[in-house]
Amino acid sequence: MGLVKIDDELHEEARRASAVMCRSINAQAEFWMKIGMLAEANPTMAFIEIVKAQLAEANVRLVQPIAA
């Protein structure tokens, strides 16, 4: 574990986003870093594809929407 220096403005954005997403500021920053790393490693994947792949890898069962 270590310290990461980030811009005050980015820290404030992480704080606001963390409140919306019910995460700690550290968890929000960690999420953004992980998604950013995955996006760089998989430049053809959309954000939602990356998230779905991570959920599938963690064996999270996604609820399918009900067709109208």
Image (tube, rainbow, N blue to C red):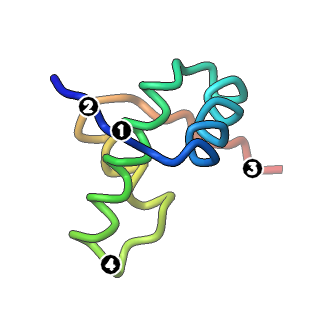
Of all residues shown, which one is farthest toward the left?
1
Which one is in front, 13 or 64?
13
Q: Mark 3 falls on what kind of element? A: loop
Mark carried by residue 67 = 3
Query: In x, y percent, where is residue 20?
Result: 72, 29
The amino acid pointed to by label 3 is Ala
Question: Disc 2 marks which residue?
Answer: 58
Q: Mark 2 falls on what kind of element? A: loop
Circle 2 Cα neighbour tier, 10 Å, few/some/many (<14 / 14–19 / ≥20): few
Which residue appears at 31% of the width and 44% of the height? Answer: 54
Q: Nearer the viewer, mark 4 or mark 1?
A: 4
| Mark 1 in CB contact with mark 2 (< 8 angstroms) | yes
Question: Disc 1 marks which residue?
Answer: 55
Could you give the CA–CA distance between mark 1 and mark 2, rounded to whole angstroms?
Answer: 5 Å
Left or right of 19: which side holds 64?
left
Which one is in front, 51 or 6?
6
| Mark 2 in CB contact with mark 3 (< 8 angstroms) | no
Is 34 located above or below residue 39 in the figure?
above
Q: Nearer the viewer, mark 3 or mark 4?
A: 4
Could you give the CA–CA distance between mark 3 and mark 1, rounded to whole angstroms?
Answer: 22 Å
The amino acid pointed to by label 2 is Ala
Q: Nearer the viewer, mark 2 or mark 4?
A: 4
The amino acid pointed to by label 4 is Pro
Could you give the CA–CA distance between mark 3 and mark 4, rounded to whole angstroms?
Answer: 31 Å
Of marks 3 and 4, which one's residue comes earlier in the chain? Answer: 4
Could you give the CA–CA distance between mark 2 and mark 3, rounded to whole angstroms?
Answer: 26 Å
Mark carried by residue 23 = none
